[in-house]
Amino acid sequence: MSLSEKNLAFVMHCGEMGSRWGFNRTIGQMCGLLTITKEPMTANEIADTLSISRGNVSMGIKELQSWRLIKVHHIPGDRKEYYGPAGSIWDMANRVFEERKKREIDPTLSLLRDNILEEAHNDDERFAQQQMQEIHDLLETVTKWSAELQRLSPEQLQSLMKLGSGIGKVLDFKDKILKKPGKGE
Amino acid sequence: MSLSEKNLAFVMHCGEMGSRWGFNRTIGQMCGLLTITKEPMTANEIADTLSISRGNVSMGIKELQSWRLIKVHHIPGDRKEYYGPAGSIWDMANRVFEERKKREIDPTLSLLRDNILEEAHNDDERFAQQQMQEIHDLLETVTKWSAELQRLSPEQLQSLMKLGSGIGKVLDFKDKILKKPGKGE
DNA sequence: TTTAGTATTCAAAAATTTCAGAAATTAAAT
DNA sequence: ATTTAATTTCTGAAATTTTTGAATACTAAA
C-alpha cells in the first residue's frame, strides 16, 4: 500500500523513463510498481499507492496488457482483479523489445518494400531508392536476427550472452564450422 | 526543392515515425529528407521543402547534430551551410542505437546500481531488490553486447549478420573453440 | 566600420498528450 | 429484478511539447 523510500524512488524513476520506453509516466510507474511488488495488486491499490485516478489506472492496465507485460490473477471468493507481471524480467524485456519492433520497425519496412518495388523515374528517385534499399536491408537483417534470438533455447541464449568478446574469436572459426557439414545456407 | 510523390511519402512517414524513434515529427522528416537527398541542402531549402519555419529547422539541425546524424558541408565562395547525412545508413543506425542506449538504459542502470548496493530492510525491499538485480544484470548484458558489436570490424559484423540460423550451430561449437586456447574468461 | 547574408534564440501561440473525476457499463450476489 | 461492487469510457481541464516568427547575434566581405 505504501512504498519504502527506495522502492518509491525506483517506481518514480520508471515514471520518468516511461516516455522513453514507449509509454507515458503513469504507465511507466505502474509497470515499475507491479514488477517490484511481490503480491499482485488491485487497481485501487495501484491508484492509492501512486496517487493517481482510478480511471487512469484502468487505461494504464489496458495499455500494459496490450504490451503483454501484466496479467490478471483471481482470488477465489473475491471478485476484484489482481494484477502482476506477466513473466520473468527476461520475458518482459522480450515483450518490450518485440512490441517496439512491431511499432518502430515493421511499418517502415512495409513502406520501404512498397516503395522499392516501383520503378524510379529520375535521378533523384534513383538515389532515394538506393538509400531506401539500404535501410530496408538493414531493418530486415535486424528483424531476422531478433526472430533468430527468440528461437534459441534459453541455455543457448545464456551462452551467447556470456560470450562477450569471444564473439570475435568464434566468428574466425565460423567458416570452418559451417563449411564442414556441407550444409550451405 | 520539391519532392516526387514517392519520396514525399517516405519523408512524411519518417515524420510520423519520428516520435517513436526518439525525436519529434519535424526532426524525423528532416532526417528522412536528408538521407534520401543526394546533394546536401541548406536550412532554407529544408524549410521550404517541408513547409516549416526557419527557426524550427535550426532547432532540428542542432538536435540531429547532437545525435551525430548529419554533418555540415561548405561550398567555396558560399557562406551558407549545407547539411547532409553524417555517414552510411549503417553508421546512422548505429548512432541512433547508441544514443538511445544512452538515454533509455544508462540512467536506469545507474539508479539500479545505487539501489542494489544498499541493504534491504524488510521483505518488500528484499523482493524488490531481487527484481532490480535481475533488471540490472539484463541491462548490463545488453550494454556489454552492444559495445562488443561496435568493436567488431565491418566484415565480422557482416558475417555475424549473415549467420542467421547458423548461430545455433556455431554455439554448439563454442566450447571446443574457446577452451582450446586455454584462455578462460 | 558598415552592411548584407546568414544562423540562432526565445517568447508566445498552437497542437498534442495526459489526467482526474463523473457517468456509464458490466457482472456478481441477493 | 434489484442492489452492490467493480471496471471502463468519456469529457474537458491541465500540463507538456512543438512550432512559429520576430528579434538578436554572428560573420565575411565591402
Image (cartoon, coloured by chain):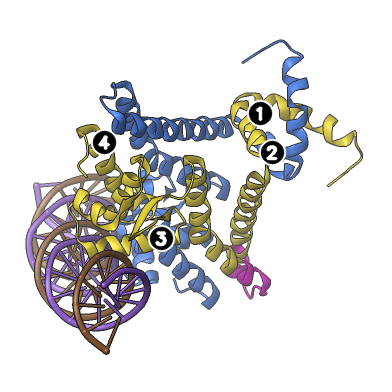
Chain colours: A yellow, B blue, C purple, D brown
- Between B57 and B168, which is closer to the camera in this rendering? B168
Mark 4, mark 3: which one is toward the viewer? 4
Q: Which mark is nearer the camera, 2 or 4?
A: 4
> Is residue B42 visible from the viewing direction of this image?
no
Q: Which residue is drawn at 42% across and 67% down?
A: B16
Question: Helix, strand or loop at disc 2?
Answer: helix
Q: Is residue C1 left or right of residue A125?
A: left
Question: Could you tell me the amino acid type at mark 3?
Answer: Gly
**Inter-mark Cα distance, 3 to 1:** 33 Å
Q: Are marks 2 and 4 on the same chain?
A: no
What is the magenta range? Answer: A113-127
- For label 4, the SS is helix
Three-letter code for the amino acid on which mark 2 is drawn: Leu
Q: Residue A7's mark? A: 4
CA–CA distance between discs 4 and 3? 33 Å
Instruction: Establish whether labels 1 and 4 are both on one chain.
Output: yes
Residue that badge 1 annotates: A167
Residue A82 image offset from top left, x and y in percent: 35, 54
Within 10 Å of disc 3 (Cα), the crowding (few <14, some 14-19, many 20+) is many
Residue to which mark 3 is pinned: B18
Would you say D7 lies left or right of B21 here?
left
A172 and A72: which one is in front?
A72
Query: In the image, which disc is placed on residue B160?
Result: 2
> What's the residue at 51%, 29% (across, down)?
B144
